[in-house]
Image (cartoon, rainbow, N blue to C red):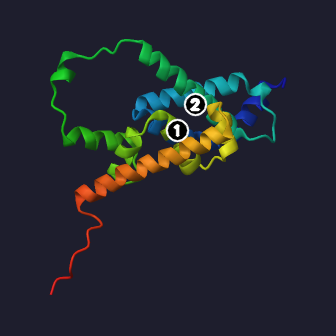
Amino acid sequence: MSDPDERRRQFESIALPLMQGLYNTSLRLTADGDEAADIVQETFLRAYRTFDNFRPGTNARAWLFTILYSVFANRYHEAKRRPRMEAVEELEAPAGPESDIALVAAWGSRWNPEVERALRRLPEDFRTPLLLIDVEGLSYEEAAAVLGCAVGTVGSRLFRGRKLLYAMLQEYAHQAGYGKHSAPDP
């Protein structure tokens, strides 16, 4: 594409409508609004740089989620290799309900906070397919392309992720007293 303005217009018309879904998924992967925004920004930068390789008429959503997951995975693995540094004040600060409320508020929850907590507790291998398929609506094939694995692997991870999530929520429901059968009041 020789005209930079036309290239920019085409990129924006294809990519910008998908920004909210990319951000929501990034937020659920990272549980950090700033980190999620950085990942989405890097996703868009990479996508724009390689936009000449994108074939119009193909699945832009799957293409962008592939880039997003690659950015997330690279940062995640890099962070695991890097020693974690925390301020002494943060280590001494008590964790309490206020911190959970702040985290859920920052995460932009559209579900019960316990659902969000359960999603965060899922291992990444199970959480990511669940988010891509059940939340973002990608097909198994698209999710497999994003994750760089076989469709069967995606199906297996999705099944196990759903099963783990269900078990976590059942535990919460039991502890909260939901689902108990009691006699009606006279």
- For disc 1, the neighbor class at 10 Å (few under 14, some 14 to 19, many from 20) is many
Report helix, strand or loop for mark 1: helix
Question: Which disc number belongs to residue 128?
Answer: 1
Q: Is residue 57 visible?
A: yes
Check whether the beta carbons of the residues at disc 2 and disc 1 lie within 8 A of each other.
yes
Residue 153 spot, x, y in % from top left:
62, 38
Looking at the figure, which quarter contains the C terminus? bottom left
- For disc 2, the neighbor class at 10 Å (few under 14, some 14 to 19, many from 20) is many
Residue beneath the point at 56% across and 39% down: 22
Q: Is residue 104 above or below residue 42?
A: below
Extreme-bottom residue of the structure: 186
Tell me: 90 left or right of 62: left
- Closest to the observer: 125 or 108? 125
Residue 12 spot, x, y in % from top left:
68, 36
Residue beneath the point at 78% across and 40% down: 58
Q: Is residue 132 visible?
A: no
Q: Which residue is mark 2?
A: 69
Query: Where is residue 89, by image quadrant?
Result: top left
Question: Separation of disc 2 and disc 1 at Cα?
Answer: 9 Å
Name which residue type carries label 1: Thr
Residue 50 spot, x, y in % from top left:
73, 23
Residue beneath the point at 42% across and 18% down: 80
Extreme-right residue of the structure: 2
Looking at the figure, which quarter contains the N terminus? top right
Tell me: 82 left or right of 96: right
Question: Which disc number belongs to residue 14?
Answer: none
